[in-house]
Image: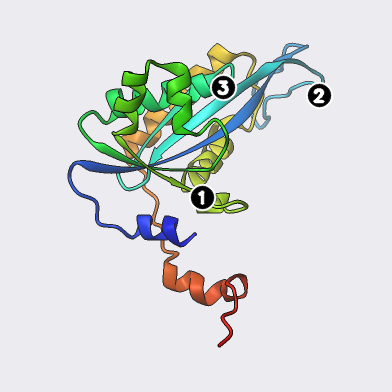
Amino acid sequence: MEDILSVYQREFEDDEVLVCMDETTKQQTRETRIPVGMGPGREAIYDYEYERNGVSNLFMLSAPIEGWRHVEVTERRTKEDWAEVIRDLVDVHYPGKRVVLVMDNLNTHSPASFYKAFSPEEARRIIERLEIHYTPKHGSWLNMAEIEIGVLRRQCLGRRIADRETLRQEVGAWQKRRNENGNTVDWRFTTDDARIRLKSLYPTVQN
């Protein structure tokens, strides 16, 4: 926990960028009956029945200081999928910068995934662009990408979306609006706060 908090308190150089990464899913659902559109003094009406149409994975990349985020919608969440997303992060979104990457410690979120997806030379090249920090077990709340996922769920995902292509379009529009607004995260919880408010979680030193 203190490692993550110290990262958030760092002063970053011009050639560095802090990026937080997390994942979520979205169940796609088709309407079984044609909805009734909005009218004067009336909201749109949807039938309670729906048809399940698969699940998509969403990789959330969030640079909370920069006010930037990118969501990649994929069919799966394999090691190769994650490796492709991170390669795009360092090569497409932040070329020339060292990426300080905060994420949870899933088995897919490992440097070994690059070797599974790419040649050894390519894997090593990507790894050398990264400085990885893992959130502790049961400490996913420390990942600022979770805040961005919460906003995405409230503003975009909290309704029926029929298929993956529509999901990509809707998420892309949401992402564009958020990036244009430059919404940042004002993280105020520090190491000193943790040592006071979470004192019971620290080991007791006996002299």
In this view of the protein, can residue 51 be seen by the observer?
A: yes
Camera-nearest label, 2 or 3: 3
Amino acid bearing label 1:
Thr
Amino acid bearing label 2:
Tyr
Residue carrying label 2: 48
**Quadrant in which the C terminus is drawn:** bottom right
Secondary structure beneath dot 1 equals loop
Please say if 198 is above or below 171: below
Residue carrying label 3: 78
Q: CA distance from mark 2 to mark 3?
A: 33 Å
Could you tell which of marks 2 and 3 lies nearer the N-terminus? 2
Residue carrying label 1: 135
Could you tell which of marks 3 and 1 lies nearer the N-terminus? 3
Residue in the picture at 33% in, 60% down: 9
Camera-nearest label, 1 or 2: 1
Q: Image quarter for residue 102?
A: top left
Residue 142 on image: x %, y %: 51, 53
Please say if 44 is above or below 144: above
In this view of the protein, can residue 170 be seen by the observer?
A: no
Q: Are marks 1 and 2 in contact (CB under 8 Å)?
A: no
Q: CA distance from mark 1 to mark 2?
A: 39 Å
Residue 126 on image: x %, y %: 33, 27
Q: 31 or 87, which lies in front?
A: 87
Amino acid bearing label 3:
Thr
